[in-house]
Amino acid sequence: MFQFTITANTSGKNAGASNNRARTGIFSTPHGDLLTPVFAPVGTQATVKTLTPEHLKGINATLVLSNTYHLYLRPGDELVRDMGGLHKFMQWPRPMLTDSGGFQVFSLAQTRKIDDDGVTFKSHIDGSTHRFTPEKSIAIQENLGADIIMAFDECSDPNDHAYTKLAMDRTHRWAERCVKAKTRDDQALFGIIQGGVNPDLRAESAKFIASLDTPGIAIGGLSVGETKQEMHEMLDVMYPYFPENKPRYLMGVGTPEDLINGVLRGVDIFDCVLPTRLARHHSAFSPEGRLNMMNAVFARDEHPIDETCDCYTCQTFTRAYIRHLIVAKELLAGTLLSIHNLRALIRLMEQIRGYIAEGTFEEHAPALLERWSNNAERKKLTQSREDVERI
Amino acid sequence: MFQFTITANTSGKNAGASNNRARTGIFSTPHGDLLTPVFAPVGTQATVKTLTPEHLKGINATLVLSNTYHLYLRPGDELVRDMGGLHKFMQWPRPMLTDSGGFQVFSLAQTRKIDDDGVTFKSHIDGSTHRFTPEKSIAIQENLGADIIMAFDECSDPNDHAYTKLAMDRTHRWAERCVKAKTRDDQALFGIIQGGVNPDLRAESAKFIASLDTPGIAIGGLSVGETKQEMHEMLDVMYPYFPENKPRYLMGVGTPEDLINGVLRGVDIFDCVLPTRLARHHSAFSPEGRLNMMNAVFARDEHPIDETCDCYTCQTFTRAYIRHLIVAKELLAGTLLSIHNLRALIRLMEQIRGYIAEGTFEEHAPALLERWSNNAERKKLTQSREDVERI
């Protein structure tokens, strides 16, 4: 279990260069094999928002992430355990991953007090007081029962070197405690590298986390406000310390370009709320750039969102219909856009795996990046007055 | 086209008695055959709220209703026509029905001024002024392109005899104008009987509408506040005037009991927003009565909503999971409950058709009515303080 088999490596004269570290692999879990590189849809509260498990199977999702902080608060990890675990509770038969709750405690909880042993915080739902320690995070994640679980970490302000060092050291101690606390052998615990945007700390953290010999390595604290260049630089700094034979998971990333750039730099696993969050804001990935589907230019557009897309939404509905649903405030719009946006990233990863397998990813990467470059932000369209007022 | 073939009639010594007028039939339309009695889900704005057409096929929905008033205002009937008509726009390949817009003009529009020629009203969306006449309603419905369309009618306060008589007479003149205005021969226009809860007016209206010889007969102005007894009495009064060989459509009805009682009294077609509206309010049909799925008693309930139900929701998820989705404010709850509630009524109609075919409906009706009697209103459950606060 949790064997990681590399099935294709980029090679040739540029092998190992910063734009040529991509590989495909198979990570075996108790709920099936993950083909990497893989993009994981986020199902924060034991549901990928507005989608059924059938929809997720239909877009070929494999790994689904769920959030420890949210499930601990509601419905409670013990309830999930008693209902047979997360897979059975939400009826997702394929691999699952839970985060440690660390990121949400620092970003969502109302107040928090951190010490070397753990964090005391107030729930963002009802203000009640709770405490997470490394041992508690592991106990919760063992109750939830995902295939891949995360060490409890502190994600600090990336620009404060002194504090980032302190938080990183604490994260390392906590990672050791998590390894020790873990009791289930059907779950793979990944240690998390921190260190902000400081090359020295990132190198130190990567080296330390690699030394723990966990079945995979997670990269935390990126995509939290730093520049793309900083993110790439950090990936380059950490790269020499990544164990070759273990999957690398870049947490909370990201945009289509981030996925392409991440794979080029040796990342195997990604997750992000972006596709479903964009869907709730009427935005769709497309070859023309990110589209605001509420725009009046789509009112009579009989094309699908993306002519090249194989998802249910694009195979079935016109842009005109989707715009109508949005304007009429019909919830089906969110479902259809979520299906499309998730499928777009999953399909991108399938395409990338194909290129890596045939040894052409480095060659295709510039065109892929160009193709997806307009999807970082909403495409500017000629807007009617009506739209300007509505948005 | 629009042939109605009766495939089974109740017979025996009670044939034609008020509790024994049920029949099964096949109503052929350009988009396929309808097996009657049939319950039609409501897709007001060209979507059955929160469901994809695949979901609807999965629960064996055949006829879907959409609302002329809403589609005229948004996205506009001419847009729907230019996009290939309602079937293509919303991708529903099976039969569709549109109402005339009359009921919504009288119940939803902000203000309205009625005269013998038509109604001028202000949109509930933006206050803009519009005018419907019988000819306009038919023109809109021809643009939308449903298989079954309705004559424009006035639904008045059922308890004001003098005004109800006036509105009924106007409805009759309008029905004649609708028959004359109609140009498409691939749509079946149904005249609508009015007359409130006045036996004399109902008889007069049924006689008149039957005389128009439309391919089907609709019964309007019921389920608008009158008692069950009044509804049954009106159905009995109209019955002698119903043409035997044409489908009878009881508009906007209803609860499971209303469906059973309606079929017993010779009704073939029903529609109602109840199943999807209940779903949005966390309510589920069940053999135990109508359940409030947010209730804390379901927090750890590993059973499906209804052990006997064959829908995706009941075949896949526990009550505990559905309650979690509701408490966590996840939209998937509405989707899953809509699937179940619609399937419950469609399955009830399948069951009734089976009983009629084997000649046992009269015999089974009391048990069916008993079985569904608790679904008229929300079941009282032992509620925890938490639930009382939350509801």
Image (cartoon, coloured by chain):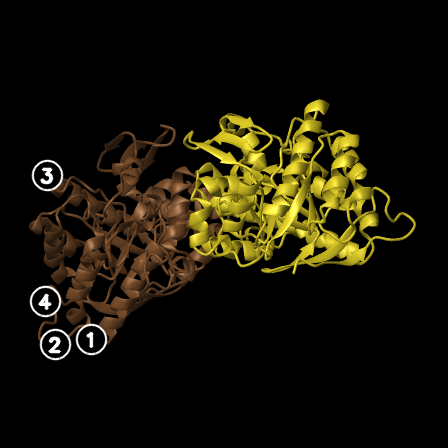
Chain colours: A yellow, B brown
Q: Residues within 10 Å of mark 2 (few under 14, many from 20)?
A: few
Q: Amino acid at mark 2?
A: Gly
CB within 8 Å, label 2 to label 1 = yes
Q: Earlier in the sequence, mark 2 or mark 3?
A: 2
Residue B17: give its label: 4
> Label 2 marks which chain's residue?
B
Query: Label 4: how many residues lie within 10 Å, few (<14), some (14-19) or many (20+)?
Result: few
Which residue does the numbered mark 1 point to in the structure image?
A: B359
Asked whether A316 or A312 is in front, the reply is A312
Q: Chain of mark 4?
A: B
Pointer 4 and pointer 2 on the same chain = yes
Foreground tag (1 vs 4): 1
Chain to which mark 3 belongs: B
- Among the two numbered marks 3 and 1 on one chain, the one whose residue lies closer to the N terminus: 3
| Earlier residue among tags 2 and 1 | 2
Q: Chain of mark 1?
A: B
CA distance separating discs 1 and 4: 15 Å
Image spot of residue A154 (x, y percent): 62, 33
Q: Is residue A140 left or right of residue B115?
A: right
Foreground tag (2 vs 1): 1
Mark 3 to mark 1: distance in Å? 41 Å
Apparent side of residue A189 relative to residue B20 in the rendered image (left or right): right
Residue located beneath label 2 in the image: B12
Q: Which is more N-terminal, label 4 or label 1?
A: 4
Rounded to the nearest whole Å, what is the CA distance between mark 2 and mark 1? 9 Å
Q: Is residue B297 left or right of residue A347?
A: left
Please state which amino acid type lies under the numbered disc 1: Gly
Q: A61 above or below A112?
A: below
